[in-house]
Amino acid sequence: MSASERGARVPTGVDGLDQMLNGGFPTGHVVLLLGPPGVGKTCLSLQFLQKGLDQGERAVYLSLEEDPEALQAAAGEFGWPLAPAIKDGRLKLTRLDPQDANNSLKRIRSELPRELRGLRPPPGGRWTAYSLLAALTSG
């Protein structure tokens, strides 16, 4: 990664948060959102996801909590329809079962590389990791 890429930021889609983060999340980093239920992890993730989709990016969304239907419903409540991006192949929603961690890890190892290969950004585009939700403090 070049020096200019190290300083690059990916906007979150939340203006106030982007200001606090000097422009957004650092490019090339994985961001893990932790917290108890109801603090906005899913909302922030979906807003970040929608921002990327609006800019023509592609995404894989892994969740340890919500199934794809619940994520689509939550996004729809904010006016972020995910179905078109799923239908045209720009978005893949996957729920991993935290109670079956061994099989979930196997799925990540086997399925995620295949999904990521199918979601290469367009020429000149950027690669953005959207979300891996883990509610390590809940339950």
Image (cartoon, rainbow, N blue to C red):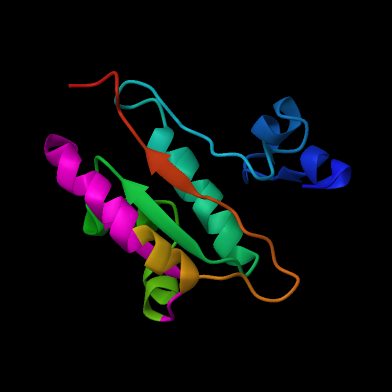
Residue 40 relative to residue 101: left or right:
right
Question: Which quadrant of the figure contains the C terminus?
Answer: top left
Residue 97, magenta (yes or no): yes
> Quick check: is 44 in the magenta stretch?
no
The image quarter containing residue 54 is: bottom right
Residue at 37% in and 79% down:
87
**Vertical comparison of 73 with 105: above or below:** below
Q: Which residues are magenta?
A: 88-111
Q: Is residue 73 visible?
A: no
Tell me which corner region of the image, top left, top right, bottom left or bottom right, holds residue 24.
Answer: top right
Q: Residue at x 33, y 33 (%)?
A: 134
Q: Position of residue 100 (x, y in %)?
A: 12, 40
User: Is residue 75 visible to the viewer in this orientation of the structure?
Assistant: yes
Residue 81 vs residue 97: left or right? Answer: right
State the image coordinates of residue 39 (x, y, percent, origin top left).
39, 25
Task: Classify 43 as above or below 125.
Answer: above
Name, please, the residue furthest toward the left: 99
Residue at left offset 39%, top offset 68% = 114
Give residue 12's position: percent from left, percent from top.
Answer: 62, 43
Total marks in image: 0
Q: Residue at x 42, y 76 (%)?
A: 84
